[in-house]
Amino acid sequence: MQQWNKLSKDTIRTIVFNALAENVNFYDENILGIPGSHLDNKVFYQDAPFLKDAPFLTALIHNPNHIGCHTLGASESFFRGTHQIERELIALCAEQILKAEPDSCDGYVAAGGTEANLQAIWIYRNYFRNHYGVSSDNICILCSRDSHYSMSKAANVFDLDIAMVQVDEATRALDEEHLQETIAAQKAKGKSHFIVVANMMTTMFGSVDNAEVYAAALEANDCRFMIHVDAAFGGFIYPFTNPGNMLNFQNKHITSVTLDAHKMVQAPYGTGIFLIRKGFMQHANTKEASYVEGEDFTLIGSRSGANAIAVWMILMTYGRYGWEEKITTLLNRATWLAGELDKMGISYYRDTYSNIVTIRSEFLSKEIAGRYGLVPDNHQSPRWYKIVVMDHVTIDRLIPLLEDLKVYQQEACLAE
Ligand SMILES: *Cc1c(COP(=O)(O)O)cnc(C)c1O
């Protein structure tokens, strides 16, 4: 079982430098066959004194390539030191956050949530084809209309049909009647195999899907299905705020999960995390990647090992309990904000366990939204604006917004 105890800065530095030392060294060794190396030494510091205290920057400069998937089979031996850190990160996310059994998952650090969602859909399309001999015409992506646009992107890239289920306007819960109708309509079009994407916090609302609703409806209709969880937004929040939730590897219906460390974890961009139960990653193998040691099971190809190191460093700096404390603070602020909106009679959506508060557009002007950088559901005719309570979104910063909302409300009353 991968441990998640807080480590000191010194320990983290030592582990990262030791890992880099196990990688190939382009400075001293005679490495003649790799089309990449450390960063250009005319442009980037190679031996500035501060680098000895800066493991992430040093990793950027060493520039290890994490091409391929390091949790199964062989990997490029040139970068074995830092591949091990990525392996630990994958195990930590799967086991400590998403309740997987030890060593039961494969995964990798993807470009982002988009790539991780595409990777899942790619794998299930190929799995259905390889295992059941069906064609793309028999396969359908199924998700709610609050899902991220990467599902539509995946449908386009992999040439699959996609069906979106309505949600309740107020609760954002799946409309079960519409789900039944959707499944019936897709069956009539010859669809028998479904790739379901369930949300653990949608981008706009922070709403969370009940995966059992999908499973029950598809089972009742004799359809085959695989369920992927899109936790790009919620994966580092919701499992801590609602530990009893069922969107994890304890749930037999769930096979894979997307996380995104460049959102709530504040890691550098390029840190999506893809996790999947063992036995499925193989369906995305590109055997033609013969020059890569261990071949390539990912969409992306070459990628920076510094990204995995950054996420690992952040999670190990906090440890489980430190992370829970950080998330508790965000949740408390979101709860406070929701309470203030209630007092003012402003209507909004918020899941009790989420740090997103989405206000109906009639309660504010475009001007107020612009002043506070609130994000609309669409830029043409917004119906909702969201506030994401992050580290920098303190109560002191929320108060001026609430005051402006109050003035807007009073002016609206006077105008009537
Ligand atoms: C942000 C987000 C994504 C896409 O993530 P990128 O990192 O921008 O590719 C996917 N799903 C959800 C729910 C998201 O919030």
Image: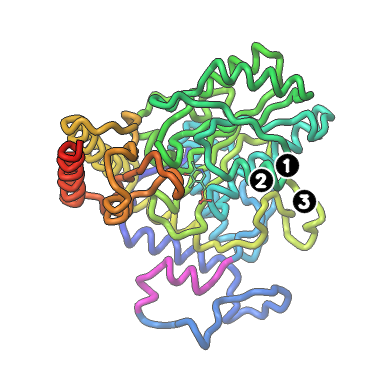
> Which type of secondary structure does the marked residue at label 3 adopt?
loop
Residue 411 x, y percent position in the rendering: 17, 43
Report which quarter residue 151 is drawn in: top right
- Measured as percent of width and height from the top left, residue 152 is found at 62, 42
Q: Residues within 10 Å of mark 2 (few under 14, many from 20)?
A: some
Judged by its main secondary structure, the magenta piece is helix
In the rendered image, the residue lying farthest to the top is 220
Rendered residue at 28%/31% (across/down):
347
Q: Is residue 346 magenta?
A: no
Neighbours of disc 3 within 10 Å: few (<14), some (14-19), many (20+): some
Q: Is residue 388 visible?
A: yes
Residue 282 got which mark? 1
Q: Using the image as rendered, state which of residue 132 and residue 285 is in the foreground.
A: 132
Q: Secondary structure at mark 1?
A: helix
Q: Quadrant of the C terminus?
A: top left
Q: For the magenta stretch, what is the residue range?
A: 50-64
The amino acid type, in three-letter code, at marker 2 is Leu
Q: Where does residue 122 sit, x and y in percent of width and height?
A: 70, 42
Label of residue 286 in the image? 3
In the image: residue 18, left or right of residue 224: left
Relative horizontal placement of residue 316, taking residue 146 as reference (left or right)? left
> Please, is residue 51 above or below residue 217 in the view?
below
Q: Amino acid at mark 1?
A: Gln
What residue sits 60% from the left and 29% below the top? 227
- Is the distance from the Cβ of mark 2 to the nearest ligand 1 atom less than 8 Å? no
Query: At 24% from the left edge and 33% from the top edge, which residue is drawn?
Result: 346
Q: Are marks 2 and 1 in contact (CB under 8 Å)?
A: yes
Q: In this orientation, does residue 357 appear?
A: no
Contact (Cβ within 8 Å) of mark 3 with mark 2: no
Residue under pointer 2: 72
- Kind of residue at badge 3: Thr
Q: In whole angstroms, how far apart are the C-alphas of marks 2 and 1?
A: 9 Å
